[in-house]
Image: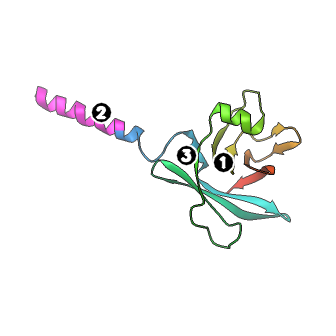
Amino acid sequence: MTKALNYLAIGTSALLLLAGCGPGGGPEAELVGVYAVKKNGVLKELVKIERQGGRYIMRDKVRTPEWSEPKMQMEPVTREAWRRITTDTENTEFVGVASEQLGVFKVPPGWKKNDFSTGTGYFLFYSRGPVEAHKL
């Protein structure tokens, strides 16, 4: 009986460990999806964030009507990187993934920084600055 309980405890522990390491990832996993921007008043799909293994990758529709091959790998954004990218010194609640060229962020709807604000709570950040995004 004791052996059976030990095996049960070991099995339960293993399942809990596997569940914690599963494909869900951290809070940035909620950024997986398709993002559109408004162009001439119409939403246009632009960026797709996917999770492959333990990594986030980005595909886009910048030059083609179909999703590109994976363009870049993205990493979760730390508070330090958030401050460097956005110059926000407040304790803003955010979730983000970024590469050297692009960041995708979720913040509270209505967040403002300088002359940019987001009503949706999502924005893309690239070399020209932030752009309001809509998660589809």
User: Closer to us: mark 1 or mark 2?
Assistant: 1
Q: Position of residue 17 (x, y in %)?
A: 35, 36
User: Do the numbered discs 3 and 1 sit on residues whose CB atoms are within 8 Å?
Assistant: no
Estimate the spatial distance between the alpha carbons at disc 3 and disc 2, rounded to whole Å.
24 Å
Name the quarter where the C terminus is drawn: bottom right
Describe the element under mark 1 as helix, strand or loop. loop
Q: Separation of disc 1 and disc 2 at Cα?
A: 39 Å
Which residue position holds label 3?
A: 29
Q: Amino acid at mark 1?
A: Glu
**Residue with the mark numbered 2:** 13
Residue type for callout 2: Ser
Percent across and percent down for residue 9 are: 24, 30
**Residue in the picture at 77% in, 32% down:** 88
Q: Residue at x 73, y 39 (%)?
A: 85
Quarter-of-image position of residue 13: top left
Residue occupying the point 77% across, 50% down: 127
Q: Which residue is mark 1?
A: 100
Amino acid type at image mark 3: Ala
Q: Is residue 106 above or below residue 67?
A: above
Residue 54 lies left or right of residue 68; in this view the side is left
Inspect the magenta stretch and tell me whether residue 122 lies in it: no
How far is disc 3 from disc 1 in space, using C-alphas? Answer: 19 Å
Residue 16 part of the magenta segment: yes
Q: Dominant secondary structure of the magenta stretch?
A: helix
Dividing the image into 4 quarters, which one contains the N terminus? top left
Image: magenta residue range: 1-17
Residue 82: where, in percent of width, then height?
A: 69, 36
- Foreground disc of the pair 3, 1: 1
Tell whether label 2 touches label 1 (CB within 8 Å): no
